[in-house]
Image (cartoon, rainbow, N blue to C red):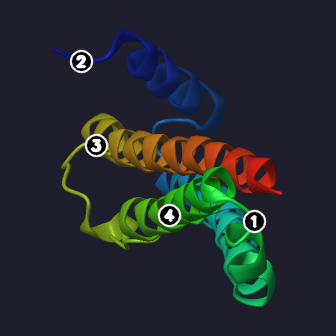
């Protein structure tokens, strides 16, 4: 059963770009993926900062008390899980030209579904990162 909101999006795209302008449609979809990838890079950079900071001060924070130890370990583990989720779910590549579909509507449906799956992985990574950071800050 097709997703009604995706069908509306496909109709809107075809109305804006025209059914025959596949090049512009592909460029628009490519920009969607570029936004996801750039935002994922920011999230991975933040994860790197957390890991680096933990390397310098994590042992001192964890040595404060058992609660601090639990919070910092949990926080860093969640940030690492977020980074893994983003790497696996968002940064995994499948070229737009590899998506099946003989007609533009079918291709758009499958490609937008792929984009939406990557978006869900990104959102999960953001939530895990925010909770991990909250635990990390709580340890201090």
| Secondary structure state at the residue bearing disc 1 | loop
Dot 4 and dot 2 residues touching (CB under 8 Å): no
Mark toward the start of the polypeptide (2 vs 1): 2
Dot 2 and dot 1 residues touching (CB under 8 Å): no
Vertical placement of 26 versus 60: above or below? above
Q: Which residue position is annotated with label 1?
A: 64
Mark 4: few/some/many CA within 10 Å (<14, 14-19, 20+) = some
Residue 63, horizontal then vertical, whole percent = 69, 72
Q: Residue at x 67, y 69 (%)?
A: 62
Residue closest to the eye, 68 or 35? 68
Q: Which mark is residue 2?
A: 2
Mark toward the start of the polypeptide (3 vs 2): 2
Residue closest to the eye, 52 or 63? 63
**Nearer mark to the viewer, of 3 and 4:** 4
Gap between marks 3 and 4 measured at Cα? 34 Å
**Nearer mark to the viewer, of 3 and 1:** 1
**Quarter of the figure with residue 92:** bottom left
Q: Residue at x 42, y 22 (%)?
A: 6
| Left or right of 123 on screen, residue 65 | right
Vertical placement of 95 versus 117: above or below? below
| Secondary structure state at the residue bearing disc 3 | helix
Q: Which residue position is annotated with label 3?
A: 110
Q: Which mark is residue 77?
A: 4
**Nearer mark to the viewer, of 2 and 1:** 1
């Amino acid at each position: 059963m097709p997703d009604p909101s995706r069908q509306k999006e496909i109709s809107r795209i075809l109305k804006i770009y025209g059914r025959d302008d596949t090049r512009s449609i592909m460029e628009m979809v490519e920009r969607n993926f570029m936004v996801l990838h750039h935002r994922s890079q920011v999230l991975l950079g933040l994860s790197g900062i957390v890991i680096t900071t933990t390397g310098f001060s994590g042992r001192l924070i964890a040595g404060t008390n058992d609660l601090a130890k639990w919070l910092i370990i949990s926080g860093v583990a969640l940030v690492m899980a977020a980074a893994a989720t983003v790497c696996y779910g968002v940064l995994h590549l499948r070229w737009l030209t590899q998506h099946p579909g003989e007609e533009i509507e079918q291709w758009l449906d499958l490609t937008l579904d792929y984009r939406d799956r990557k978006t869900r992985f990104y959102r999960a990574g953001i939530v895990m990162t925010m909770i991990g950071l909250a635990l990390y800050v709580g340890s201090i």
